[in-house]
Amino acid sequence: MSSATVAVSVADSPEQLRSLAFWMSAEDEFHGCVSLREQPDWDGEPGGVPDAVVVVLCGDTASAFVTSLLTWLSRHHALDRVTLTMRGPSGREIELECGAADDATELVEVLRPLLDDET
């Protein structure tokens, strides 16, 4: 089965990223598929500030990802929107912004073709 990665970014909010990573990690569908991507610290060593939550998706987890993300956003009123950078198995990349009020069905429709993109 094909997989894709989604990097969720929030401008200047490492604590919100940690919260989202914890939230997503608690979902059974994403066990072992969620990580925090960190910018290297000033001397180039790992352990810097988180700049994205990265989730590995396969076809049957796209809906769960979107539902979980939009639910998390609806509970974090300080955030309007997040940026999603999605990369399919072929390396094709799509970037978009979404917020809690966005339609989950539309987001899944964007993700599914990316998951199926093998070439």
Image: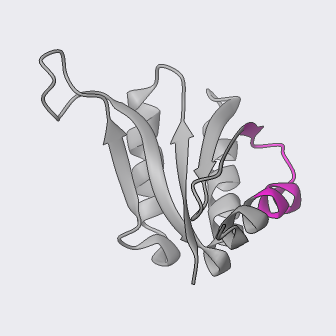
Q: Tell me if 116 is positioned left or right of 1 in this view.
A: right
Q: Tell me if 112 is positioned left or right of 33 in this view.
A: right
**Residue at screen point 75% across, 43% down:** 100
Q: Considering depth in this image, is 22 or 111 the residue closer to the camera?
A: 111
**On screen, residue 94 above or below 15:** below
**Hey, which quadrant is residue 17 in on the image?**
top left
Query: Is residue 100 rendered magenta in the image?
Result: yes
Q: Quadrant of the C terminus?
A: bottom right
Q: Where residue 90 appears, x then y in whole percent?
A: 59, 61
Q: Residue furthest top?
A: 42
**Hey, which quadrant is residue 25 in on the image?**
bottom left
**Hey, which quadrant is residue 67 in on the image?**
bottom right
**Magenta-tinted stretch:** 96-110
**Residue at screen point 69% across, 59% down:** 66
- What colouring does the structure picture have? one colour
**Residue at screen point 57% across, 84% down:** 1
